[in-house]
Image: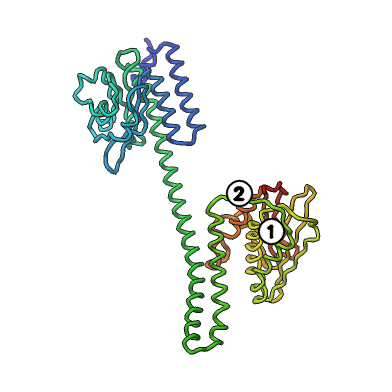
Amino acid sequence: MAPRVDESVSWLTDIPAREMQRIVDALYRVHHLISVITDLDTLLERIMEESKHVAQAEACSLILYDPVTEELYFQVALGETGDQQALKREVRLKLNQGIAGVAAVTRESVNVPDVRRDTRFYRLADETSRFETRSLLAVPLVDRDKLVGVLEVLNKTDGGPFSEMDMRVLEMFSTVVATVIVNARLIEENLRAERLSAIGEAVAGLSHYTKNIITGMSGSVDLIDQGLEVDNLEFLKKSWPIFKRSTKRIAHFVEDMLAFSKPRRPVIESCDLRMLIDEVAQTFWGLLIRRNLTLEVNTDGVTGPVLVDSRGLFRCLLNLLTNAADAVSQPSGYIRVAACFTSDRSLQLEVSDNGPGVLEVNFNKIFEPFFSTKGSQGTGLGLAVTRKIVKEHGGKIDVGRSPEGGALFRITLPQLETTN
């Protein structure tokens, strides 16, 4: 007695060896595409090209289901003739409308040898695309019992109808396509949720920071108003420094956001490093005096000018010095800036302090945008901007511990040729 063949795969026994090889090759190519193509639209177009090829069809369409409107719309339309893009722009089908609508509702493949004899055929699609459909095979896309869409192939190239083998092979393709689409949508939803969460955290942090600055400015404005009303110079003298510091913090904050928001090609120029550090120190001097901090600068290891983007490096040093000043204790706090050339003639800058240092667990996080250990007192942008500027120079920045136990930030910049 001959062994019983499962009806669901009995059609395989009738396929010639050459045809079987062609099908296997097509399925192998599809699975390979899934592993190498990350862009969903490109991947779907390539899979549809394979569907068209394996079914030996003149055209094919990928029609997706929109659960909100309960309509079907053309995501991919491929064909050598007709206006396939018009389908994507203009045609939407209700469930049970057209052959695709029937396949979507019944969750079963529909093979129509001659659409002229089938009243279910939606002729507006042909009129819109200016393509003449003769035969059509529609296969539903279903994943875990949820409708994803419909895969269609049109017009067998030999002029005949699509076969049962064509239908079975496309049903295999439909399983792959449905899984790809669902997985891509899940990934996109997760990314969107993570992105919204990150934006929410960033906005909350920035809002707290700006609120603190504005509170200080508002208080200063009230005192200045009172001083002007009673002509009291002491009120003005006490209020003006606070207001001035607040405006500098706002300016610093805005500059960091601008620097972070767009790529910038560094303008490399010959620069006197000691003079640049002195300019940063002058900007930073008021904070040093108020907190009774000591700043030590050693540039003995640098002889002659250096090639850097002076504006960008100024921003980096100011951010690092400001962070150090926020970290060290008073009145014994000190900050050290040192510079030298390395053995390969790269410029190395170090900013260290005698504060509590950075926890090792935060070494990788500290340069991430909006990560801050200062609570509402920081934006989490300063170090992210610093790393961005350093990377634009082709350099790197590392964080570690200074010999005294505080934080040590080391910037290494290659000495690039001047672009001026």
Position of the N terminus, as image quadrant, is top left
The local secondary structure at tag 2 comes to loop
Q: Nearer the viewer, residue 294 or 103?
A: 294
Quadrant of residue 8 in the image?
Answer: top left
Q: Nearer the viewer, residue 357 or 241?
A: 241
Q: Nearer the viewer, residue 337 or 111?
A: 337
Q: Residue at x 48, y 69 (%)?
A: 211
Q: CA distance from mark 2 to mark 1?
A: 23 Å
Q: Residue at x 39, y 24 (%)?
A: 51
Residue 409 is marked as: 1
Tell me if mark 2 has few (under 14), some (14-19) or many (20+) residues whose alpha carbon lies within 10 angstroms of its own: few
Quadrant of residue 5 in the image?
Answer: top left
Relative side of 289 to 139, left or right: right
Q: Amino acid type of disc 2?
A: Arg
Tell me if mark 1 has few (under 14), some (14-19) or many (20+) residues whose alpha carbon lies within 10 angstroms of its own: some
Q: Residue at x 48, y 74 (%)?
A: 215
Residue reaching furthest to the front: 420
Q: Measuring from the top left, give residue 14's x and y in whole percent.
A: 37, 12
Q: Measuring from the top left, give residue 353's x and y in whole percent.
A: 70, 66
Q: Amino acid type of disc 1?
A: Phe
Relative side of 102 to 416, left or right: left
Residue 80 is marked as: none
Sequence-wise, which precedes: disc 2 or disc 1?
2
Q: Is residue 223 above or below residue 51?
A: below
The local secondary structure at tag 1 comes to strand
Q: Nearer the viewer, residue 401 or 378?
A: 378
Residue 265 is marked as: 2
Q: Residue at x 59, y 60 (%)?
A: 382
Q: Measuring from the top left, give residue 207's x and y in whole percent.
A: 47, 65
Residue 149 visible within the image: no
